[in-house]
Image (cartoon, coloured by chain):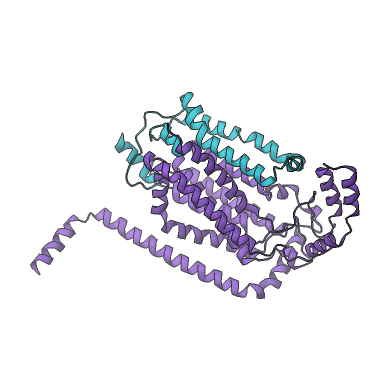
Amino acid sequence: MAKTFREMNGMSWFQTTRSNKLIMAAIANLILVPLWVLSFFESKFLPLLAVAGINEYLYNATLYGGLYYVVFGVLPAKFFKRFRLLNRDSGYFVVNELDVRTSSFAPMINELK
Amino acid sequence: MLNSVHTDEVTASRIDPEEDKSVTRFKKILLVRVLGSFLLIFIIIIQRVFSSYTRNFENALTDNFQELLGIKSYDDIPAIFYYFHQFRYIEILLAHLYFTLFFLTNALVTFKCLIVHFNTLVIVANIEILLAEPRPFWDFNGIVGAVCDPSFAFPSYPVFTIAFFFWYSSHCWDTDDEDGTTPFVRKLKVCSFVVILLFYGVSCLAMGLNYPSQIVLALLYSLMCFYIINFFDKMINNLIMRSSIQVDSAKRYTIYWLVYLLLLAVLSLIVYSSSDPYVNIVWLKNFVKSRNLMPNLTMILFLLVRMPGQPDRQRIRSERVLSSSRYNNYQSAQSLTYSTGAWSSFLRTAIIFAMAGNYSGLKPN
């Protein structure tokens, strides 16, 4: 998250048009499709991985850790930025105090604009 | 005296009536939360005291409920219940939910909700081990156990997960501004919450995984957790802000997060290592005993013939699992020691995520 916001110079990059939001959410959800397939066949290949020294814990941790890293980091900072799906003219978020709820977000962003 | 009167007049003239109203409202909310927390803790203590007395009644109730649904053996339980109670699928469903909210609504609010939600899940999973309450099918032979789940039952984990997400997401998103949830979405959310909660409540009872009191108390626990988290709301906001949007401090906070997660993992490991390695269930004790006493001739012969045969060794072990008409055995042989379950899953994922985050979080642009 820190890296993503740094890449965008601290902008509220996610406040973009509704269609862009939908595309981004759809792509993020599509990334989970291989995970469903892997989960269904987990019991078949996990014993084979265990022989190679990769137990279930290590497998899951790497898989899910990598997944969250890709979706929260790589996707917005690299992929969506390149395809101009993010809001790059948004207000800056660098403030001293912020109530991280939607009620205080909107007016603050408008003021900063 | 004159000075004091003058100051009072000036102060009174400065107080905005709307601001005064909001202060009164805030005080009321605070009072409700404090009283609510105390009341919930009181109810939970009362339940803990009387739980051993109500156990027989609850056993009969769960047994009758299963009979009402026509469940006489574990084959009668609908397959969909099994899928929705497997943690690996719940984990993916949660990922779907948070990814959608992350890109569709507000990334920071979602991130805050995710962090708080997963942290409370780790805490509750540790409470489960500390309280060590049995599952119904361990306690009473009449109850059909859908899966021979070697993990404790109190508070009901899926019910807590759903309920806490509902309370906390309502706090974060249900606001009156243009970014807040619309009345239609709010109604939809309430309806889906009730439906999902009923589904998990009924399936937990039907599968013999939870007592009714464990389900109801999971709801109360989630509410109590929500109240407690609300007291730290400002601190959490600062934490989220400093580790994301304040780009200067964010580098330091990536390291703080990793240290925090490692400490949490150590604490959880201490709690886990202090728990009983084998859950208190007759069937499981028999299994452990038979496994220790059984001459391992087949295994020795097998190892002599084929050395790198780990999958086949698994198969041989699975054939040795005792079968029972009342408990559903795992299809393949698994560790029958206490299932580390959700806290371990979340923590190991979070640690890997934090390590990867440290790499890019500290890397100069």
The reply to whether residue B103 is in sight is yes
Check the image and report above or below for B214 versus A14: below
Locate residue A25 relative to residue B51 in the image: left or right.
left
Q: Residue at x 42, y 56 (%)?
A: B232
Task: Name the one closer to the observer, B304 or B37.
Answer: B304
> In the image as oriented, which residue stretches furthest toward the top?
A83
Check the image and report above or below for B151 versus B347: below
Locate residue B202 relative to residue B11 in the image: left or right.
right
Count of marks placed on residues:
0
The image quadrant of residue B61 is bottom right
Q: Position of residue B290 (x, y in %)?
A: 85, 62
Task: Name the one closer to the observer, B145 or A4.
Answer: A4
Q: Position of residue B137 (x, y in %)?
A: 74, 63
Q: Residue at x 55, y 69 (%)?
A: B44
Q: Which chain is cyan?
A: A
Q: If the image is split into quadrants, where does the N terminus of chain B sit?
A: bottom left
Q: Residue at x 89, y 46 (%)?
A: B304
Check the image and report above or below for A110 versus B139: above
Locate residue B269 relative to residue A18 in the image: left or right.
right
Task: Name the one closer to the observer, B300 or B224.
Answer: B300
Locate residue A16 relative to residue A33 in the image: left or right.
left
Q: Which chain is purple?
A: B
Q: If the image is split into quadrants, where does the C terminus of chain B sit?
A: top left
Q: Position of residue B141 (x, y in %)?
A: 79, 66
The reply to whether residue B154 is in sight is no
Q: Position of residue A10 (x, y in %)?
A: 38, 35
Check the image and report above or below for B176 versus B70: above
